[in-house]
Amino acid sequence: EVQLVESGGGLVQPGGSLRLSCAASGFTFSSYGMSWVRQAPGKGLEWVSGISGGVGNTHYADSVKGRFTISRDNSRNTLFLQMNSLGAEDTAVYYCARHTGVYYVDDWGRGTLVTVSS
Amino acid sequence: EIVMTQSPATLSVSPGERATLSCRASQTASSNLAWYQQKPGQAPRLLIYGASTRAAGIPARFSGSGSGTEFTLTLSSPQSEDFAVYYCQQYNNWPLTFGGGTKVEIK
């Protein structure tokens, strides 16, 4: 059974940093593309960043480019999202998402809440 | 960036009444279009990929159609558990983009 478990969310002050983790199990993690997708309170889904399986090519939404960094540790079956220069607009539930060979999401984590507030 | 526009924002239907949801892309997404269902407090769930292929375990009352820039999700006879928010997502180009969602509510 595929499991994606996010951690690392919490309350952070504007301008601060946070690192999210997603522990994956139940599949060959290194072979799959992965993404972070967020959802602000009461709003829709927004794709944030993705990383391919294999060579680990990365992609970012314009809203986070230059502030967020996605990475993966295939030896630990873990996906990361380093978030810097956080603002109120980054407040959201952040979901870890698994892609198939093409980039729709076939499995989702339960999400971790990030709140940016003073 | 491909902008995805869903309509209507809210759709009120009676159980068993056919529901048709629309998703439009600002440029071609080919058939690289997925639909998701999300219920309150839950993560989204994949319904349809490749514009028309049902994901594993998805009932036949859910169907998808379209290609290029116009896509449709049809609920042929909605059951009580189908009242939720539905999102489309294109994966033809980076960045991946979602539509704003359609809430299907009980009339």
Image: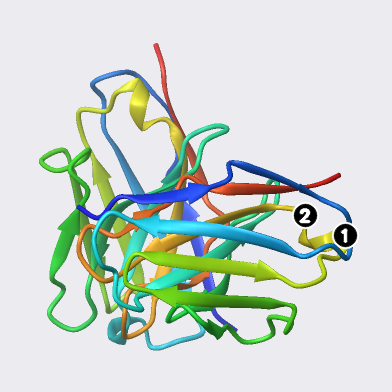
Q: Amino acid at mark 1?
A: Ser
Residue assigned mark 1: B80
Q: Position of residue A13 (x, y in %)?
A: 34, 19
Secondary structure under badge 2? loop
Residue B83, numbered label: 2
Residue B21, numbered label: none
Q: Chain of mark 1?
A: B
Local crowd size for mark 1, using a 10 Å CA cut-off: few (<14), some (14–19), many (≥20): few
Front residue of B42 and B1:
B1
Q: Position of residue B33 (x, y in %)?
A: 40, 71
Residue at x 51%, y 62% (from the top left corner): A5
User: Which quadrant of the view contains residue A118?
Assistant: top left
Position of residue A38 in the picture relative to residue A76 (left or right): right
Residue at x 32%, y 72% (from the top left corner): B68
Are the residues under marks 1 and 2 on the same chain? yes
Secondary structure under badge 1? helix
Residue at x 87%, y 59% (from the top left corner): B80
Q: Position of residue B12 (x, y in %)?
A: 77, 45
Does residue A70 lie above or below B73 as drawn?
above
Front residue of B16 and A64:
B16
User: Which corner quadrant holds the C terminus of chain B?
Assistant: top right
Colour convention: rainbow
Q: Position of residue A77 (x, y in %)?
A: 36, 75
Q: Amino acid at mark 2?
A: Phe
Rounded to the nearest angstrom, the CA distance separating label 1 from label 2 is: 6 Å
Q: Chain of mark 2?
A: B
Local crowd size for mark 2, using a 10 Å CA cut-off: few (<14), some (14–19), many (≥20): some
User: Decide: marks 1, 2 in contact (CB < 8 A)?
Assistant: yes
Q: Residue furthest top?
A: A118
Tally the marks.
2
